Amino acid sequence: MIPFVRDMAFEYGQPDAVSPLIRRVVANNPGPFTYFGTGTYIVGHGEVAVIDPGPLLDAHLDAILAATAAERISHILLTHTHLDHAPLAYPLQHRTGAVIYGLDEPRHQTDEGDEDPRSAADEAHRFRPDVTIADGQILSGPGWTLEAVFTPGHASNHVAYALTEENALFCGDHIMGWSTTVISPPDGDMSQYYASLDRVQARGFEVLWPTHGPPITEVTPFVEAYRNHRLARERQILGELRQGPATIADMIPRLYRGVDKRLHVAAARSVLAHLIHLVRTGQVDCEGPLNLTSYFKLISNSTMGAGS
Ligand SMILES: [Zn+2]
């Protein structure tokens, strides 16, 4: 079981000093993927960095500006370019002159064998930060030091930021206290996700600050449980395929028994992410293109490692 943490005291638009160097302002965009809303972090005092400005909401822009009224925002850092994290970076930059750091929005990708519905015009509107950050790059201001830690998986361009002074990690949507994170192929990638979890675990951070929800303070057991949850799902999928070849649609009702049917579409993408990983690691075979409608079958010698 994942030891979820879900309690968080806050008021929309009001900055909270949550550590000596960190303030958090929550945007009013609650939802099934954002929990209470986007938590924008302000790091430092006087000359500050803003991490994940959030969605295009005027009230949230005003709240960030009010929270930093007598200060200068020198850096805007993005964990990734999803709509609940990045779009407010441009208006905030317009008002403050801050430099935007992160990784370009990925090119639109589709499952193998699917049509790409996005036009060349859309391609021109990809989000691009001013500075393409490098893994391990250090950004600093008075009294604070942030290190970029590449953590692809939820998104191919996902970057976490380590705050050296507090041995803390702003982990974006890579790890969330209130929920598991969405891994939706082809941009979401389960193999990369596992590697990024290991990477965070190896660093021994004292606290994780996700963009949504409260901090995670029992980092090692939490990340361990988070990883085990994915591995358990993987074993269930292998168990399904041990009964014979199957499509994702065949497996979903059994894998997600008791789960609201409206969530089955998202669940199918998550199972696809697992299956892509299992194909890559030589445990599962797939006939034809690897997508939501493929037929999957177990590679016989993989039954040995599948447990039960
Ligand atoms: Zn998010």
Image (cartoon, helix red, strand yellow):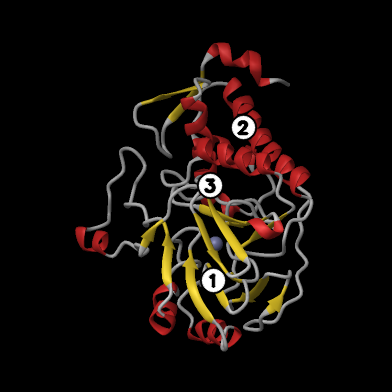
Looking at the picture, tell me which residue is in the foreground, 239 or 214. Answer: 214
Residue, x 64% and y 25% (percent of image)?
A: 239
Looking at the picture, tell me which residue is in the foreground, 270 or 247. Answer: 270
Closer to the eye: label 3 or 1: 1
The image quarter in which residue 305 lies: top right
Looking at the picture, tell me which residue is in the foreground, 116 or 143. Answer: 143
The image's mark for residue 151 is 3
Q: Please provide percent x and percent y for residue 276.
A: 47, 33
Q: Earlier in the sequence, mark 3 or mark 2?
A: 3
How far apart are labels 1 and 2 at the CA level?
37 Å
Inspect this view and state whether residue 259 appears. yes
Crowd around label 2: few <14 · some 14–19 · many ≥20 (10 Å): some
Q: Is residue 108 left or right of residue 246?
A: left
User: What residue is disc 1 on?
Assistant: 50
Looking at the picture, tell me which residue is in the foreground, 279 or 263. Answer: 279
Q: Please provide percent x and percent y for residue 191.
A: 52, 35
Q: Secondary structure at mark 1?
A: strand
How far apart are labels 3 and 1 at the CA level?
19 Å
User: What residue is disc 2 on?
Assistant: 234
Residue, x 65% and y 20% (percent of image)?
A: 306
